[in-house]
Image (spheres, helix red, strand yellow):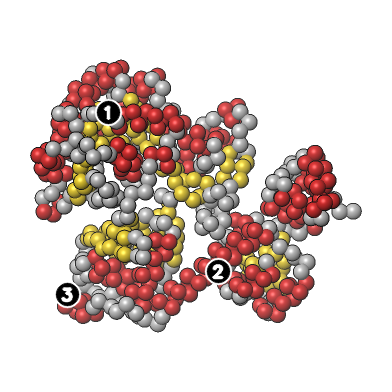
Amino acid sequence: MREKLGEILVRLGHINQQQLNDALTRQKDSHKKIGEQLIALGLTTEEKVYRALAEQWAIEFIPAEKIMQSDLSALELVPESFARENELIPVGLTDSAVLVAMADPDDIVAVDSLQHLTRKQVEAKLAAPGAIIAAIEAMYENIRKRGEVTEAIGDLQFFAPSDEDDESMVDMSKAAPTEDAPVVKLVNLMLSDAIKARATDIHVENFEEGLIIRFRVDGVLQEAMRPPKQSHSGIVSRIKILSKLNIAEKRLPQDGRFTIRTADKEIDMRVSILPTVSGEKIVMRLLDKGAFAFSLKTLGFEDDMLLIFRRWIRQPYGMIIISGPTGSGKSTTLFAALQEIKSVEDNITTVEDPVEYHVPGINQVQTKAKIGLTFAAALRSILRQDPDKLLIGEIRDEETADIAIKFALTGHLVFSTVHANDAPSTITRLLDIGVPPFLAGSTLNLVMAQRLVRKICPHCKEEYVPDDNELEALGIDRAFLDGRKFSRGPGCAHCRNTGYHGRSGIFELLEMKQNIRRLVFDNANQDEIRDQALENGMTTLRDSAFRKIFRGETTTHELLRVTVQDI
């Protein structure tokens, strides 16, 4: 006798006996299968029910993450319409058989039709219907994209000019192509896919094994496409033409920019080209020039941290410094602060490189080093512009730091950023740049370090209990959990099989209280400043990340990726 589905779910710990009894009672009125009834009541998930079914039927279960890794050559054998109609998706291929994930492996008609279609034996495995539908959406989109790349390239041959070719020959061979040219189609496809994927950077890299295009989405690089290796020269030349760079120069780095206009937005593309041993590498940063759409409430501040931050940004003078690596959201936080405090009574001016966000009511200056408009030069002019509040994109040198300090000392509120690892080291970084300790101690109001962690995809989020190895990596014991579970995302079509969608900030706020100021006056090191700040109640970046983990917003992987454990 087969064990009943409900009994299997109870044995596996997915539901308890009382929940099963309740579902059986309600099943009499609904006439649903017991698995459907349990899912409808929210007592378990579709995947757990189908795992139990696989055990009941003694058949292999294919999880969602494995379906998302399906062999594209197997998918190409089965039309998308057939896969949708029969709730199945090919996941693998051998010389004689095709491995298929099905919601109903006993569907003899579908299996027989698939054998005639593929002319191969069918090995049917069980999978959850929701996972199959999500995989069909994602995987057949990949096939269409690969077809678009192949169509864009066509039979065109690309030839890189040799070092002996002169500039006129290169100009002739790389004349601006028409919009129908295959290389233009390929570049347009790359750019449009990056915009759709919410990418912040595009990497075009030429390796021995082939040409790889990657997008940075939510702070992490993902492979997007692999065009033919011979297309590399054409892509580089097209990007150089768009950026008005020297297409003949292949030995030196070059920087340029161009703008993309779509129906609803304008995107500034910052281009960097770097010669490598395997050819020129392109990195393009995408900056959305649309209206600023963030607020302090949406950045991820904890309630207690938001109160502290709001209190200091409303002070009449002093300095607020935000630190963190490139891409950690510093500029976004600063502009969200300016958005909140701006008024017709204040003259707010910014000096940036580049201007990332356009904010109405704020005077924004973009530096241009080639013509001598540096941070320091722009700031000296702004002194005569009657400013009330000032944002300096980044304090990079002693001259910029000196002018920023003078602004703060003369009754202005100054916002800026510094590259440092945490809040205490930000202060010592300013001292290293050349700011005297007595000036740093008297002008700083708040120093904040921040990072961005990816948020778990809400469409595939699930809870789990961490194992001992994971707890050891985090540096905590099981008692610290206090019975709480962690969350993660196994991956789905919505999140491009990453398990994450969107980002949120974690923060470390160091308030410049009197005991901290005295340490700065005495030229204390960052460890002494840190110890005193912790005594004052400062929440570290790591603790801020733990808060989000316990609320099910992010994962332990993200905590380990962006924070360092204190030893």
Mark 1–mark 3 Cα distance, whole angstroms, equals: 58 Å
Task: Mark 1: give few (<14), some (14-19) or many (20+) Cα within 10 Å.
Answer: few
| Label 2 packing within 10 angstroms: few (<14), some (14-19), many (20+) | some
* Callout 3 secondary element: helix
What is the distance, in whole Å, between disc 1 and disc 2 at their CAs? 55 Å
Horizontal relation, residue 378 to residue 354: left or right: left
* Residue 135 shows up from this direction: yes
Disc with the residue nearer the chain's start (1 vs 3) = 3
Q: Nearer the viewer, mark 3 or mark 2?
A: 2
Vertical placement of residue 220 versus 386, above or below: below
CA–CA distance in space, label 3 to label 2: 44 Å
Q: Is residue 120 above or below residue 437?
A: below
CB contact under 8 Å: marks 1 and 2: no
Please provide percent x and percent y for residue 353: 23, 49
The quadrant holding residue 335 is: top left
Quadrant occupied by the C terminus? top left
